[in-house]
Image: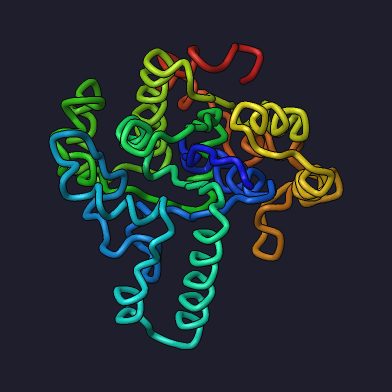
Amino acid sequence: MIKTRKPILVTGSHRSGSTWAGKMLAASPHTAYIHEPFNINHRCKWTSSPFKNWFQYICEENSDHYEALLDRVVHYKYPLGDNLVKVRGARDVAKITRDQGMSLLHKINKDTPIVKDPIALFSADWLSRTFDMNVLVMIRHPAAFCSSLKLKDWKFDFNNFLDQPLLINRYLGKFEEEICECAQNEKDIIHQAILLWNCIHYTINIYRKNHPEWLFVRHEDLSLDPVTQFHLIYEKFGLEFTHQTKAIILESSDIHNPIEQNSANEFKRNSKENIYNWKNRLSQNEIVRIKEKTSEISNLFYAEHEW
């Protein structure tokens, strides 16, 4: 009989290797990878109705709207009917058929759900308590984070924060004035990325103080020695680390993989060299600007020599 294990939440900063981490944890036998139930862009997904905001904050005051929805996620109750009405083509049908079949199989096998979702970061406390989850929080160097958003040109509407007064009151009050300014007047991508990094990692630091039982892992440390670091995470979460698991981790991070992400090998990269991509993507002025504007928080995670 398979030993029942706690569900696992892989969250933290987006662009921090959370997908890589989630997929590598799912390389353990008797696990199931669940991709971003909080993502409001996905049409056919694991949640039956979309959240209204990016980075939805769930707490005791508003949990009545979400608890049953997320209970279905961690117990493999795939929302087949809700997804069928969203079908736009053969690709959607194939995805729904695959996900429905896999959810039934995972439920029968009592596999451990691995919910990968950086967008769920601000709800991590509630999720861990409500569903008794183990939590892995990913951290990323501010320059690397900013360079990744610059490369993707991923702009952010800060009204997603302002529309959640509970979130502002609980975690982001320190940044409310700047959030308002960014919501009213669009800033350049580096400015937006700096504010996002500060909001996210300020909250992560609160979690570090309040949740010593959680795992907090820097993307850089995981990238330098993936096999050793993932083995430690496996042990913490009671996951089985097999020879095949090790091979999958090595394949994903091999020195012969590309340094930069590409569509053909999105999650197979030279993990060691990938750490310092930001030095080539950012100008010196941008690096100085990021360092100055994040230093109050980044100094809690990164030393001077890591710039």
Pick whichever, 55 or 277, lies toward us. Answer: 55
Rendered location of residue 88, percent (x, y): 38, 85
Q: Quadrant of residue 5?
A: top right
Residue extending furthest front? 1
The answer to whether residue 53 is above or below residue 172 is below
Q: Is residue 168 left or right of residue 270?
A: left
Q: Is residue 221 above or below residue 72?
A: above
| Residue 285 in sight in this render | no
Q: Is residue 304 visible?
A: yes
Image coordinates for residue 81, horizontal then vertical, percent: 31, 77
In the image, 85: left or right of 280? left
Q: Nearer the viewer, residue 222 or 182?
A: 222
Which of the image's four quarters has the C terminus? top right
Where in the figure is residue 276, as x and y percent of width and height?
68, 33
Identify which residue is drawn at 49% across, 47% down: 116
In which quadrant of the rendered view does residue 168 lie? top left
- Which residue is depicted at the point 35% across and 74% down? 83
Number of marks present in the image shown: 0
